[in-house]
Image (spheres, rainbow, N blue to C red):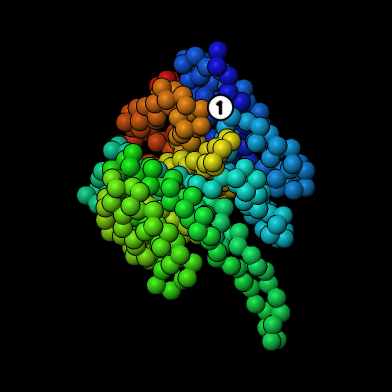
Amino acid sequence: MVQHRVVLLPGDGIGPEITAIARQLLEVVSQRHGFELVFEEQPIGGSAIDAAGEPLPAATLAACRAADAVLLAAIGSPRFDTLPREKRPESGLLALRAGMELFANLRPVKIVPSLIGASSLRPEVIKGVDLLVVRELTGGIYFGQPKGRIEADGDERGFNTMTYSASEVDRIAHVAFKLASQRRGRLCSVDKANVLDVSQLWRDRVDVMTPAYGDVEVSHMYVDNAAMQLVRDPRQFDVLLTGNLFGDILSDEAAMLTGSIGMLPSASLGSAGPGLFEPVHGSAPDIAGQDKANPMAMVLSAAMMLRIGLKQEAAADALEAAVDKVLAAGFRTGDLMSDGCSQLGCKAMGEELLKSL
């Protein structure tokens, strides 16, 4: 029997709740489809600070590097907001992405027909939306140097550096071009080339690469216009290619097209080694431990892990079909609730998903 090693990172807030459900489903679906998953849990974020005094212990990073895939729930807690930035939970996530050399973040946004009424946008605007945000993950302003805070001319100044090399742009653009060629053949590259030199380099490199992908129609869009177009006419997009900062913002905006950020998975990939799969949403400390969390994004992240990370296509299909079946039956967590539906807590939703398998 094929065996896959999976590191689970429950993290903080609602993370342990949704991880428990995803693990149950993965155990069932792996048995049904003839492979074995060997799980190992490791701390990250606030839970790691509590356990080891740092947001990414060396043992956690080593385990992730040695795994076949990594499934992360969520990190972050206001308890740690007063710590120096490098000691906060979010710094552990950035260090994990860098340490695993994960440069490409994939965030699919697809409207589920049974949830079309949950969106704040009109049904005729979002019906049929199926887009993919490809975000560069290890460069840009989050990692650029120099950065910091200094005293200058009697005032305090904070600064960060947005920087990309041509090779970094080429690497992420190659991923986006390949995905666009496998989808509907449209790639929109997002930048701010009218005011930023780094964005002009980004645009130039995308243009240089375009002739090699003759089956892909390429367009460019300024980030402010892209933000507007996502709520005006999201169906125009197939694959959106973005830098780190712009992708962080736009992918969360795109997530709300579905009605809840609690529905969307993501994958972070490198050139080699295991991928990292995680929900787009955060740790939601305000509802942690109250059985109110929506586990769907975590379950769909597990499906992405099966499909992309472990090449278990049939098992991934089964998990996604379970989600569709439960939603079509009218079961909802509070964030998705609408008239005529049955509201469930996190555990009960997990039970319905298990039944549907």
**Residue that extends furthest to the bottom in the rendered view of this protein:** 153
Q: Is residue 237 visible?
A: no
- Using a 10 Å C-alpha cutoff, classify the residue at mark 1 as few (fewer than 14 neighbours), some (14 to 19) or many (20 or more): some
Q: In the image shown, does 284 or 313 lie closer to the viewer?
A: 313
Q: In the image shown, does 214 or 158 lie closer to the viewer?
A: 214
**Residue that extends furthest to the left in the rendered view of this protein:** 124
- 246 sits left or right of 215 in the view: right
Q: In the image shown, does 298 or 248 lie closer to the viewer?
A: 248
Percent coordinates x, y for residue 144 in the rendering? 60, 62
Q: How many marks?
A: 1
The answer to whether 27 is drawn above or below residue 338 in the figure is above
Q: Quadrant of residue 146?
A: bottom right
Q: Quadrant of residue 13?
A: top right
Residue visible at 55% across and 17% down? 2
The answer to whether 62 is drawn above or below residue 326 in the figure is below
Residue visible at 68% across and 72% down? 149
Residue visible at 28% across and 45% down? 215
- 102 sits left or right of 316 in the view: right
Percent coordinates x, y for residue 134 in the rendering? 43, 49
Amino acid on which disc 1 is placed: Arg
Q: Is residue 69 visible?
A: yes
Q: Secondary structure at mark 1?
A: helix
- 46 sits left or right of 69 in the view: right
The N terminus lies in quadrant: top right
Percent coordinates x, y for residue 241 in the rendering? 41, 53
Q: Which residue is mark 1?
A: 23
The C terminus lies in quadrant: top left
Residue visible at 39% across and 57% down? 208
The answer to whether 281 is drawn above or below residue 114 in the figure is below
Percent coordinates x, y for residue 344 in the rendering? 44, 33
